[in-house]
Every structure is written in C-alpha cells, then in structure tokens.
Image (cartoon, rainbow, N blue to C red):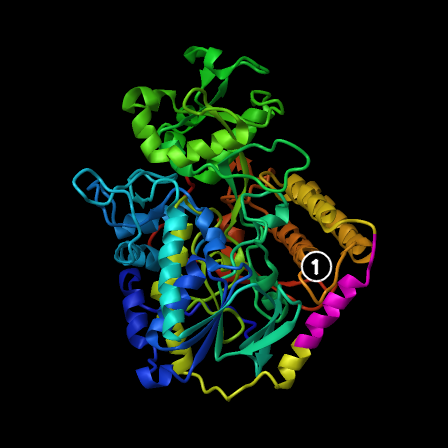
Amino acid sequence: MANKLDSKIPSGPIESKWTKAKFDYKLVNPANKRKHSIIVVGTGLAGASAAASLGELGYKVKAFCVHESPRRAHSVAAQGGINAAKNYQNDGDSVYRLFYDTVKGGDFRAREANVYRLAEVSANIIDQMVAQGVPFAREYGGTLANRSFGGAQVSRTFYARGQTGQQLLLGAYSEMMRQVDAGTVELRTRREMLDLVIVDGRARGIVVRNLLTGEIESYEADAVVLASGGYSNVFFLSTNAMACAVTAAWKAHKRGAFFANPCYTQIHPTCIPVHGENQSKLTLMSESLRNDGRVWVPKAVGDKRHPNDIPENERDYYLERVYPSFGNLAPRDVASRQAKYRCDEGRGVNDTGKAVYLDFADAIKRLGEDKISERYGNLFEMYEKITGQNPYKQPMMIYPAPHYTMGGLWVDYNLESTIPGLFVAGEANFSDHGANRLGASALMQGLADGYFVLPYTLGNYLGGTKLEKVSTTHDAFKFAEDSVKKEINKLMSIKGSRTVDSFHKELGHIMWEYCGMGRNEAGLKKALEEIPKLREEFWQNVRIPGDANYINAELEKAGRVADFMELGELMCRDALERQESCGGHFREEYQVDGEAKRDDANFCHVAAWEYTGENKPEVRHKEELTFENVHLATRSYK
C-alpha cells in the first residue's frame, strides 16, 4: 500500500499527455477480457457509464446500487446542463478555454493534467449521449443548443430543459441494461457496500448488506470501482437525496485509501430557503436560471415590502454591481458568499431574513413568458409546488445550501486510489474540480470517467498485474464479513433513547455553523470538541427499532450517520490545517475585501489523509500542485 503520493502524470506537453498515456497503457486482448471480473459500486452517471463500457468491452461486471433501480441515482437530480468544448456558438470557446476556466474556477487547487483530459474528452461525451438518444435542446435549425453557466463567458452548456441529469442517466442506464441483457453485467439492487476486501495488498472484493433481507453478502473481483457519489449529507440539510452517503468511500478509506481535501465542499447559491425545523432536505434551483434571472436584495435594511412593490432604484443587483464582467453568472462559491454578506447586512428577505431574490421580470418582458417556460418550465412548476408562489408573477426567493463535494478519495491520473486495484470515479474522487466546481461540470466528469477514462486505465492495471484467483471463502472475506456483522450488532444492541435523525440533525448544525460557508479557527476548534462528544453519545444512546435481519431503514441510516460523524471530524481538521481561503473553503481570517486569499507558498497542494486506526489522529500527506500552463494568479470575476 502506497504511502507516497505518486500522481503518475504522463510526461510531455499537456495537450498530448492523454494520447501518450493511452498508447503507453498495457492492453488486455478480447479473449482475456472475458476472464476478468470488475465490481462497480454505484450506478449513477459515473457507475452506469463505467459498467456499460466495461461490459461492452467484454469484462464480467458486477454492479451494485442501494436503490431498487439505478434510475434513482442522485445524478437524476441534476438540472441545468453539461459542459463541453464544442464551440457551436462560435463565441471563442475551445478545449484550452474550458481547461483554463475549470482550473481558475477551482481556485488553482486542481491537478492540471486531469483537468485538461476532462476538457479534451468533453466533446466526445456529447456525441456519445446524442447517439444514445438523449434529447438535448436544439436551435430552430436543428443544431444542439447551448446556454451559459457560472464562471464562464462563453455558452458551452448542453441541456435538456431543466432535466439534464435525468435524461443523461436514462441514456447511461439504457446502455448498462443492454449489457445486463447481454450477460456481461450482473446488476444487484438494494445492496449497500459496508466493507472493502483487501487480499495481498490489492482490492479484490466487497461486503454488502442486502437491504431487503438483511443478509451480509460477499463478492470477489479482480478490481473494484467506487462511483458512490459525494458527502454533502454530512450537513443533514443539503440538496442531496436522502440516501446519499459517504459510507462506501469511508469504508475504503479505513482500509487504506487516502481521503483528499475533505474540507472542499460546495455551497450552491440558488436553493429554496429552509422553511422549518422539521425539514429533511433542501431543493436545488438550477444555476441555469441565472442566465435570465437577476439576483437582488432591497437597498434598505429590513425592507419587508412585497418585491413587486420595491421600485427599481431601491434594488441592489449586487452580483451585477460587484462583478460587472460576469454579473449573475459569477461562480458558485463567489455568488454564495455575496448572498450571505447581504443577509448578514440585514438586507435578506423572507421571514427569516435568509434569502435573496431571483427575478425574471426583465427576461419575461424581453422574451415572453412562453420562451421562459420553454427553458425553465419544470423548474418554475417545482418552485411553485414547494413555495406556493408563482415565479412568473413575482421573484423567486433563494439561499445558498450544501450541494456538491470536491473532496473525495485521492486518485492518481489513472483514477486509482492508494489501494492498488481500487479505482474511484465521479464525485467520489477528488480529482478534477479543485476547491470549487463550476456549474455543469459534475455530469461532465462522471461521464468522462466512466466512458472515456476507466476503460483504458483499468485495462492497463489488469494487463500489467499478475492476480491470483480469489474466492469469497478466502480468510480476508471472512474477516471483513465478521467486521461488518460486529458493527451491526453493536448498533442494534445500544437500545438508547434518541433517534438517528436527531443525531444527524445535530451533527449537521455543527457542520453548517462551524465548517459551512464561513470558517474560522475558533469555530473549527469548537466543532472538534463538539463532534467527539456527539459521537460518544451516539454510540451510547441511539435507538434503532426493528430487526437487523430484515428491511430496516433506521439501521441503514445509523451506519451512515456513524460514518458522517467520523468524516465531519476529519473535514474540520482539514479546514483547520488549511490556513488559507480558496474556492468553497473560506477561512474568515484569510480574505481581501471579502474575497478568498490563497497562500500559494504554503498550501498549493492536495491534502490527503491516511487512516491510522480507531481514535487515532489521521496522518496528513501532501501532493504538491504545479501550474505550468495556467499560471497562478488571484481569481477575479470583476
């Protein structure tokens, strides 16, 4: 198991690194592919595309998901679009500009080589998805339409109304199910990965819990792909689906996979505000709405008038004022902080004062209600159903909320973790977005990893590694199964008085208060005192009704919350150690005029944490970042 972080970046100019790597990789001939098995955990965009591609190549794929159908993966919730450098608008876009925008958007905390590859394969993704029948929006003449997203001055975002994630997932799902029908992919639904099995230092299988029967099952393979998504639910209230969890990645971390940059979390600026104490999740309003919507607050403190009664000269369109070059399409971290500043000044709206307006009146006047409905109709309908307010007649109210996590398991250029044979794709890895992801880039990364990267890098691993035959009767599988059963029995035997949700909600409050949009040394140290106390109480006083050997949603949640507590502590440690502000990691002590102040001399690196044992401090490793193509500079969107 590697202790030194070797990113395995190919030599040569950045434009040719991926081409060179593909040529240098070892190959597996078609007959031998049928002899290899690969486990894929998660069947969202990254997992489904990986399973489909690997099955098509001839590998024996075992795919697992926690839902009853892969179509319920959280990728389905993405709304606004997917980026690609096709330059259909002839507005100055290119592979290099997408690369540049992504590095800059991530505040110079991403690995250049990975980002360039992402930009390079982006155009292939669109061709692939169109061939699968994804109904992207089109211009009058039949060409694919584009719109703009934050952090870019070109229109490169392809979209399917406000349902882009759903349509892309249906495309990838259809391709995977074709392989299921062909017999190359075995799909097992309602399984949750609870441990990773290591044999001779390599990932060789997983242990899962059958969520319908409670049975503990083991599966072996020659390599394992984790595509299990992000960890925003550590905040309890987030835009993530309720089943989104860190458990699969965290179990791998505790078996030796380093966890990189856990404090890099994204707060999305356009979400429906919190409306009560009993709320269990938040709802995203797509960033695409900022193409035509204008963000504003009243100029006067405490102005409680109806927004339609506030005249134009008494409104502060603050993003247009502060960032005239990008206006309402400033990046997410920047737009979120500005919304917080306005509310902190007492100019927030809603009964709570924790909201700002997103106004479409000018766009409706310019384009007509029919055109706005054509672009965003399902989003407007969703907003009205949740809030009871008609956004065609009055501005939406929005506020920032946890949405995406740029941190994740550390991977090298080949998407391989510090455990040989364990590959990590999509949001579950840390690799492409630095300290802030640009809008419409998550779908791009998930499909790039699954369709265009893993088929090469997994082949290189399998072609260059001598693997002994392993079965689930091996002692390593028995050890992992026993560990899983022991933890389940421990949880079930507590029989305390507090619900799992009450612990999760309290953890979320600590994380949002001290490791959310704004962080400081005192707050992070406070969190590092509070979380261990909460965790100790959890293991003494949580109440899990029902039986472990049957359907038990509370047991599922309890295991996930236990992992969130450990992750939350690491997030706070990581945020405390990183004494700078960059992207979504905003340390209040390190700022200039309200903007993030990086410290490139001391923190221009990836922080990758190594698990050393229960109740022992994790060890922080560094991967130094070098910028040879996009030179380090202070981000400016003004």
Q: Amino acid at mark 1?
A: Leu
Residue 23 drawn above or below residue 172 = below
Depth check, front residue: 372 or 330: 372
Would you say residue 185 sits in the magenta stretch? no
Residue at 73 percent across and 66 percent down: it is 488
Residue 467 drawn above or below residue 591 = below
Residue at 62 percent across and 52 percent down: it is 571
Mark 1 lies on a secondary structure that is: helix
Residue at 62 percent across and 64 percent down: it is 212
**Disc 1 packing (10 Å; few <14; some 14–19; many ≥20):** many
Left or right? Give the position of 344 relative to 164.
Answer: right
Looking at the rendering, the stretch of residues picked out in magenta corresponds to: 481-496
Outermost residue, left side:
141
- What secondary structure predominates along the stretch shown in magenta? helix
Would you say residue 490 sits in the magenta stretch? yes
Q: Position of residue 174 (x, y in %)?
A: 37, 61
* Picture quadrant where residue 586 is located: top right
Q: Is residue 112 visible?
A: no
Please give the residue where the numbered disc 1 appears in the rendered image. Answer: 555
The quarter of the image holding the N terminus is bottom right
